[in-house]
Amino acid sequence: MEKEKILEIKNLKKHYGQGEGLIRALNDVSFDVYKGELLVILGSSGSGKSTLLNIIGGMDSPSEGEVLINSRDISKFKDKELTNYRAKNIGFIFQFYNLIPDLTALENVMISISGKDAKQLALSKLKEVGLEGKEYHYPSQLSGGEQQRVSIARALVKNAEIILCDEPTGALDYQTGRQILVLLEKIAKDKNQTMIFVTHTSSIASMADRIITLRSGKIESIVENKDKKEAKDIEW
Ligand code: ADP
Ligand code: MG
């Protein structure tokens, strides 16, 4: 069966600074993302992972190249289209959760949706990520793992086409990190959710359908993962 492309990344470049200080954070990166896949982008610190994810998420713009969603280049989007793209197509899960401290868990999830059933929807997502009973807690009253669950609920509640995860276990202890991986894996599987997950931890890549290795802003390899492991069996 022909896999359906959801994103096409073409000859992406991102430079910072100039002259002697020029940094090529992304240096001619091209790949496709398929609907429903769990794609892990693996690379050491500074290899360009966050830069790439931020550009895909419409939070940063490339110096050159294209990010095509349904054959439309997001870097040509007007402000309003880009805001719309971020709101509708992209769910973002960050290393440090990025929750709003003076909003409750429920309010943090509701922030990404509107409409009269927003509250019901947010409550059901919080339940789905295992936070029943914590809906009215503020981030400071939640553990790191719980805060990451809130951020996962926030990404899920809008039914985004693509979920982007930037080192989502990076700030968590080992056990908690693994619980978060198990949750993300379940979401990817149950919902056939397209997910791009960046990490510097090579063993985490073993849960991927496909693994792209990034090195100094360039793609080193793109491989199908023939030996896919369950998150619960991954050790690092
Ligand atoms: P990773 O997420 O893989 O650790 P990043 O994408 O954050 O890597 O960074 C890639 C490179 O680009 C690094 O050399 C980093 O220092 C540089 N970089 C990232 N953001 C900026 C910025 N806003 N200004 C200047 N250099 C940056
Ligand atoms: Mg990073």
Image: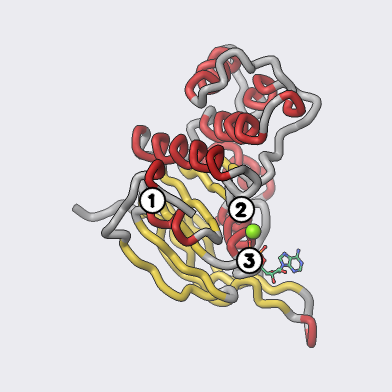
Query: Dot 1: what SS?
Result: helix
Identify the residue position indicated by label 2 in the image. 77
Residue 101 or 88: which is nearer the viewer?
101
Identify the residue position indicated by label 1 in the image. 207
Point out the tag, 1 or 3, that comes first from the N-terminus: 3
**Relative side of 168 to 103, left or right:** left
Q: Residue at x 53, y 28 (%)?
A: 157
Point out the tag, 1 or 2, that comes first from the N-terminus: 2
Q: Amino acid at mark 3?
A: Ser
Query: Dot 2: what SS?
Result: loop
Q: Which quarter of the figure has residue 200?
A: bottom right
Colour scheme of the rendered structure: secondary structure
Identify the residue position indicated by label 3 in the image. 45
Spatial CA distance of label 1 from label 2 is 33 Å
**Does label 2 point to a residue whose CB lies under 8 Å from ligand 1?**
no
Question: Farthest residue in the bottom direction?
Answer: 20
Question: Farthest residue in the left direction?
Answer: 1
Q: Amino acid at mark 1?
A: Met
Spatial CA distance of label 1 from label 3 is 20 Å
Q: Which quarter of the figure has residue 138?
A: top right
Looking at the image, is mark 3 or mark 2 nearer the viewer?
3
Query: Dot 3: what SS?
Result: loop
Q: Residue at x 53, y 56 (%)?
A: 198
Location of residue 139 in the rendering, given as x and y in whole percent from the top left corner: 73, 28
From what the image shows, is residue 94 above or below residue 107? below
Q: Amino acid at mark 2?
A: Phe
Q: Residue at x 65, y 46 (%)?
A: 171
**Relative side of 207 to 53, left or right:** left
Location of residue 120 in the rendering, given as x and y in whole percent from the top left corner: 55, 13
Q: Which quarter of the figure has residue 126?
A: top right
